[in-house]
Amino acid sequence: MAEQESKTAKEEGGKKKLIIIIAAALVVLLGAGATAYFLFLKKDPPPEEETNEQVEMIQPEIDDAEIGPMINIEEFIVNIISEDTAHYVKASLTLELTNELVQEEATKRMPQIRDAVLLLIGNKTFEELQDLQGKKQVKAELKNRINTFLKTGKVKSIYMTNFVVQ
């Protein structure tokens, strides 16, 4: 009987070893299968297109419509709001107008236009005028302000031909 118990114990020990070996083999096979899937079968995500957003934002909007008459605003220098040190803007602008009649009116009202430009830019901060969005904001505000006192036509667009903030 002792022999049978010893055989049974050996058989049970052998079965346990066999189960452990099979389980280890399964773990290794599953690991190898997962590795093969991720390395060889899984598709890579499509590469993201690199776009230079700054270049896209800087490009002016080109209108296919007819270009209106232009009038230049001479170079001016104006102090701007700053908490730490004195800052100023040195700029010149060109106004695109809707028709020839408003060009004559704008020439007559040039002191009024320059006053509007100086007051508007003089009330901006150094930080507002540093980035592209701030400059676009100034152009839009100037266009609206100048259009309030022009009677024979309107300003279609404002172009900054020179703009230095220091």
Image (spheres, helix red, strand yellow):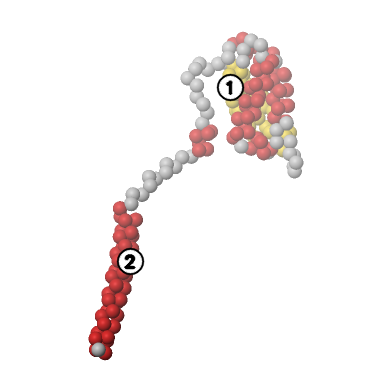
Q: Position of residue 137 (x, y in %)?
A: 63, 29
> Marks 2 and 1, Cα distance to the nearest angstrom?
71 Å
Q: Position of residue 102 (x, y in %)?
A: 63, 12
Image quadrant where residue 107 sits: top right
| Residue drawn at 39 percent across, 45 percent down | 47
Q: Nearer the viewer, residue 97 or 123?
A: 123
Check disc 1 and give the amino acid type.
Ser
Relative placement, left or right, of 122 versus 50 is right
**In this view, 42 is above or below 75:** below
| Residue drawn at 69 percent across, 25 percent down | 117
Residue 161 can be seen in this image? yes
**In this view, 53 is above or below 161:** below
Task: Name the mark nearer the viewer: 2 or 1.
Answer: 2
**In this view, 83 is above or below 41:** above
Q: Position of residue 55 (x, y in %)?
A: 50, 36
Image quadrant where residue 110 sits: top right
* Picture disc at residue 27: 2
Relative placement, left or right, of 55 versus 93 is left
Check disc 2 and give the amino acid type.
Val
| Residue drawn at 26 percent across, 82 percent down | 8
Residue 162 can be seen in this image? no
* Picture disc at residue 157: 1
